[in-house]
Image (cartoon, rainbow, N blue to C red):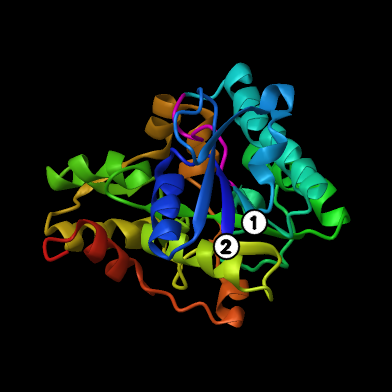
């Protein structure tokens, strides 16, 4: 296939480009800086500036654009940046895919589409949207693909969980603390922590690209949901470190503000129904297996 990738410099994008190339696919990268390589095209989504040649003869577009949810303390301007960095590129690429006749659009989204107030209720792709800033952000993000869906482009919405990778994301921040024996549960520990290994995130994206039976929302989560307390114990076992500490909810709210409530203290109990029904073979079925492969001593 010829696959055009936007957001290719991040954790997931870098791994995806490498995996696609290993599998023999042609990759075209959309970059904000001046293009330096033959497989790159510069674009500016804020101005809807995209070279018509970039999507020519492409079999799929993969859009992974979006500023980091927990990178900064939330305020009005950063919330707007989080929204604009997702919705604007999605709208541009959805319209461009239609104009170029690209048959498939794979677009990032988030598992927090379901909100965090669902408790123990299981969330599948058919579950309703939740409430809160992150849920609303995901709804707007997915709605921006409408030009493609209305034109009959096969559109896949990747409702991704926390991606477990030692080189980036949440795990990269937690690893030093746990390694020093400073790990512990956050808040009550009863909230769910949606997770997926980087290997399965990439494997499932490529599976979705090549499996035409998949379309619409796809929960990119591991098949065995865990609570924060269960995640904490699994992390301690993988690193062979104690996890005696406890960070109360009020301290998290004081430290990171509003993000603590939606991104740390609440999380949906989501399961990968669409992937399982389509026959995706997970590499890591449990949090223990995922963490052992990612940060474990024998990995």
| As drawn, 123 above or below 185 | below
Residue 29 magenta-drawn?
no
Q: Where is residue 254 in the image (x, y as percent from the top left)?
A: 42, 25
Kindly identify the residue that appears in the image at 53 percent across and 70 percent down. 207
Residue 69 magenta-drawn?
yes
Identify the secondary structure beneath mark 1: strand
Residue at the outermost right position: 150
Front residue of 25/294: it is: 25
Q: Where is residue 244 in the image (x, y as percent from the top left)?
A: 19, 50
Q: Position of residue 228 (x, y in %)?
A: 38, 55
Q: In this view, does 81 lie to the left or right of 131?
A: left
Q: Position of residue 85 (x, y in %)?
A: 62, 30
Q: Is residue 242 left or right of residue 253?
A: left
**How many labels were placed on the picture?**
2
Q: Is residue 265 left or right of residue 114?
A: left
Q: What is the distance, in whole Å, between disc 2 and disc 1 at their CAs?
A: 8 Å
Q: Which contiguous range is marked in magenta?
A: 63-72
Q: Mark 1 points at which residue?
A: 60
Front residue of 220/18: it is: 18
Residue at the outermost top position: 77
Q: Which of marks 2 and 1 is in front?
A: 2
Residue 249, quarter of the rendered image: top left
Q: Mark 2 points at which residue?
A: 1
Question: Looking at the image, is mark 2 or mark 1 earlier in the sequence?
Answer: 2
| As drawn, 36 above or below 169 | above
Whether residue 232 appears in this view of the structure is yes
Mark 1 burial class by Cα count in 10 Å: few <14, some 14-19, many 20+: many
Identify the secondary structure beneath mark 2: loop
Kindly identify the residue that appears in the image at 65 percent across and 59 percent down. 59
């Amino acid at each position: 296939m010829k696959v055009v990738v936007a957001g290719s410099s991040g954790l997931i994008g870098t791994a995806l480009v490498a995996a696609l190339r290993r599998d023999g696919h042609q990759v075209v990268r959309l970059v904000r800086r001046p293009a330096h390589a033959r497989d790159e095209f510069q674009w500016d989504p804020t101005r809807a500036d995209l070279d018509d040649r970039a999507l020519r003869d492409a079999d799929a577009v993969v859009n992974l654009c979006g500023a980091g949810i927990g990178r900064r303390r939330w305020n009005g301007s950063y919330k707007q940046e989080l929204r604009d960095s997702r919705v604007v590129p999605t709208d541009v690429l959805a319209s461009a895919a239609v104009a170029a006749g690209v048959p498939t659009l794979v677009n990032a989204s988030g598992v927090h589409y379901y909100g965090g107030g669902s408790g123990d209720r299981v969330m599948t792709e058919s579950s309703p949207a939740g409430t809160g800033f992150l849920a609303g952000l995901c709804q707007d993000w997915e709605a921006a693909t409408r030009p493609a869906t209305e034109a009959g482009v096969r559109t896949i919405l990747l409702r991704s969980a926390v991606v477990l990778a030692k080189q980036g994301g949440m795990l990269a921040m937690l690893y030093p603390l746990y390694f020093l024996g400073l790990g512990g549960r956050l808040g009550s520990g009863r909230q769910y922590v949606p997770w997926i290994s980087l290997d399965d995130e990439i494997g499932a994206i490529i599976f979705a690209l090549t499996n035409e039976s998949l379309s619409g929302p796809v929960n990119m989560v591991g098949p065995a949901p865990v609570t924060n307390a269960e995640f904490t114990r699994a992390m301690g076992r993988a690193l062979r470190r104690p996890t005696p500490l406890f960070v109360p909810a009020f301290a998290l709210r004081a430290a990171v503000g509003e993000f603590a409530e939606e991104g740390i203290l609440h999380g949906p109990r989501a399961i990968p129904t669409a992937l399982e029904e389509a026959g995706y073979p997970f590499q890591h079925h449990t949090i223990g297996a995922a963490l052992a492969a990612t940060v474990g001593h024998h990995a």
